[in-house]
Image (spheres, coloured by chain):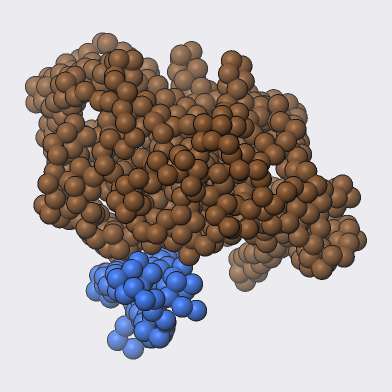
Chain colours: A blue, B brown
Amino acid sequence: MNAQTSFPVFVTAGFLIWSSAFVMLYAAASAGCAFGWQMEMVGPLSLQRLVLLGVWSVHLAAFVPLGLALRRRGSPGDRRSVFADAPFWITGAAFAATVFIGVPGAVLTACA
Amino acid sequence: MSAPSDTHPARTAGDPAPPTSPVALHKALDAIWRTPPGWGRLSAVNHTVVGRRFMLTAFAFFTIGGLLAMLIRAQLATPHSAFVGPALYNQIFTMHGTVMMFLFAIPMLEGWAMYLLPKMLGSRDMAFPRLSAYGYWCYLFGGSILIVALAVGAAPDAGWFMYTPLSSRPYSPGINADVWLIGVTFVEISAISAAVEIIVTILKLRAPGMSLDRMPIFAWYMLITALMMLFGFPPLILGSILLELERAFDWPFFDPTRGGDPLLWQHLFWLFGHPEVYIIFVPAAGLVSTMIPVLARHPLIGYTAIVASLVALAFLSFGLWVHHMFTVGIPHMALAFFSAASMLVAIPTGIQIFAWIGTLAMGRPRLHLPMLYLLGFFFVFVTGGLTGVMVAVVPFDWQAHDTHFVVAHLHYVLIGGFVFPMLAAAYYYLPLVTGRQTVYGLGKAAFWLIFLGMNATFFLMHLTGLKGMPRRVHTYLDAVGWTELNLVSSIGGFVMTMGFALFVVDVALQRRYGARTRRDPWQAETLEWAIPLPPTSYAFLSIPHVDGRAPLTDAPQLGAKLAAGEGYLAHARNGWQETIAVEALSGRPEQIVVLPRPTLLPLVSALATGVFFVSVLFKVYLLALAGLAITVCLLLAWTRAGGARSDIGPLSAGRGLLLPTHLEAARPPSWWGMVFLLLADGTMLASLLFGLFFLAVIASGWPPPAGLDGGVAAGAALAAGAFLAALAGRGALARARRGASPSLLLAGAAAGGVVALGGVAGLVPALPDPTTHAFGAVSTALLAYVGVHAAIGLLLAVYGLVRVRRGFVSARRTSDLSIGSLWHDYVAGAAAIALATLFGLEGMLAG
């Protein structure tokens, strides 16, 4: 796939990861509070916190292959085109948004 | 009323006779494309006519909504006001919000999109003109239900977001809430149809050479908006259906005493409701991005950054819905996720604002009237955005929630983010619509009245809110200190109304007395200014080839050349309405699309749909079923005018280009339409599943007292039937493409549909009673969803057989089968998910 034909994939992949992270963090927070995961300790962390950190980490890790694939993809002649630039910017924004969105799960009290 | 020429002949000459002159070609094309006069106007499907109707009707509803706002301000102008009583006041504020959101803002943007997009993209019409017309009539009839109810005193009165349990039967026993649920759902048919149409038009019906990165920026904005509509509206439609089922049949989706939860309604509503804010703002921002470069005389700065920010905004806007629910008792951590997303979404919006400011700073702005409105937009919208960041912060929201501060915020966002850009665009595009020059005297006075009146009304409302005045109260005591602020707000409201009245007078005068304008009076860069003014019925006499983002800047004489027939399709062939479809990414020409001519079918279909909705409203369910059946038959009748009984082969598109017609293309626009329709459909299914899991985890009264009672064999039959239909549908398509007869496999697909429906019927007795617990209600709704889809699949299989027997299918002409195959695949997937959910959840609950 060159930069043009891969455009739909790369222009959406980053924020699809963010969407998945967002939904799963909200679902895990809600389910954890409903089922009392915050009361069960796994080492120094509650099961609730462990699940949230796990969900967050997996989604952050998903950006690694995406970033590598972005670097590998072909580039059109005109470097300053939407096809060339937009996927990089969008993926970068999605990564930053995924970092930001997971912070509450790492630091806030779970079920107050 | 369809013209006989819609049925395509067996074979046409590859090259039509060249036109004798541009004038002769104009007459020939106009005879093909024009809407008939008199009663024939009811058959209009042309994008210029339907788009204009959407905008005019939306403005009529805006006037009604504005008058209701005046009644609200008259009531609140003084304490202890006896102007209207509390019951009527409830109807007035509910209808004000409902009219403005559902009957004004969304349809107005649909109208702009339909009117402008084909002209901007270098196409002669939208992808599905009859769908445009059908959507318009559904909008008009659905909106009329709401307005008639208001006139007879039976309007909705539970607030424009219809929170349960207030809107549930015990607390709203009258027909008022049903009017909202039925009327709004009817109107939303037009939103979904418009979304599908806009997406397919932008992706496929562009001028040759117009790759995605050469599209006018407005097309990017509308593409993103339409995608958001596709995913945003299904949760609302689902929520409305569920609430109507609860009110009519006592299925307790939202009843906490029987496993339901009122918060489920809030989730479904705001899953739609917050993206809706951006669905309203983004098209208006698209118009801003279109006008600013022209008015600033400088190319738009940051085209790529704006595209990237739009993609980010589209995703982020779906992560904000709970910020409308910060005070309902959700754990703080969950609130923090939504608070974070609410702050993040300000960034892409900010990028656009900086791009606009940068463009203005780099250019030489002309302070014409549209620019005045744009400056008003900047001030008002940025103010609304800043208060938006304030209410995104949870502790502040707890203080300001449900006060007039929020009312002020949302009006700054919506009037600033939608009304001001619309007014700017109205003046900017007035020469395009009317073909007349614009004089700005009255318009400037109207601007200042609207701008000052708006700020007087709503800026002070921030203060009234901070002083503690709640929303939706019909009166207040003098002693609480809100009197002066409310009085000035009311005076401001009336000043703003005078401004809008002056705007109407101004536009009417301009249209009546304005001098004729020349083509492209703004020296703009986009293709809508390359057509004759006012627009002809066919828009482009010949279709351009596009080599850059600013075709009129690159070739200032492009309009004249196209009018001389120097582009594609400069002919009138077979009485066909022809335009070109391109490969979605590259803009490489791909097919000649032959569009349908004017027909009464959309109007008649919408009337039959109206019979269905009105019958449901009055609970005459047999008549509703009849209305539904007639609607389905009429929608199938749309296909009678299309198709060909023999292969046509490649045809000349002019300039040496040979293209197949869409009838012989592997993926015609209708195939893409089905893809996007199924995405919306899938969102509805996902919303229903979300509802089930939400109730199972959050609601009280779970696990349910009764689960599934057997049903394994019936479930297996449903799965087997659905997969048989999908496999047979694929096989039929493959055989047809090889030139073999697909009839036997289509019969297999139909048989699969029958088996699947049998499985659904067999599962019904296994489900718990839908009135005793929410699990029974949701699982029955889930099964009904699959059953309806399986029935449509059966219909499509039989339809495919009929089309094959009548000669409409060949190795080249397979679109009837490929669309059916898509549907069968979806039904198989939906059945598998539904069965896995039902039996999986049953197992978990039992465990």
Regarding residue B153, the answer to whether it shows in the image is: yes
Q: Quadrant of the N terminus of chain B?
A: top right
Q: Nearer the viewer, residue B378 or B215?
A: B215
Point out residue A95 in the picture as x, y percentages from the top left corner.
31, 74
- Residue B787 in the figure: left or right of residue B261: right
The residue sitting at 16% across, 29% down in the picture is B451
Relative to B605, residue B764 above or below: below
The residue sitting at 75% across, 43% down in the picture is B8
Relative to B82, residue B605 above or below: below
**How many marks can you see?**
0
Relative to B184, residue B485 above or below: above
The residue sitting at 70% across, 31% down in the picture is B2
The residue sitting at 40% across, 29% down in the picture is B534
Toward the top, the furthest residue is B82
Q: Quadrant of the C terminus of chain B?
A: bottom right
Q: Quadrant of residue B383?
A: top left
- Residue B438 in the figure: left or right of residue B844: left
Regarding residue B698, the answer to whether it shows in the image is: no
Point out residue B529 in the picture as x, y percentages from the top left corner.
36, 40
Toward the front, the furthest residue is B20
Q: Quadrant of residue B443?
A: top left
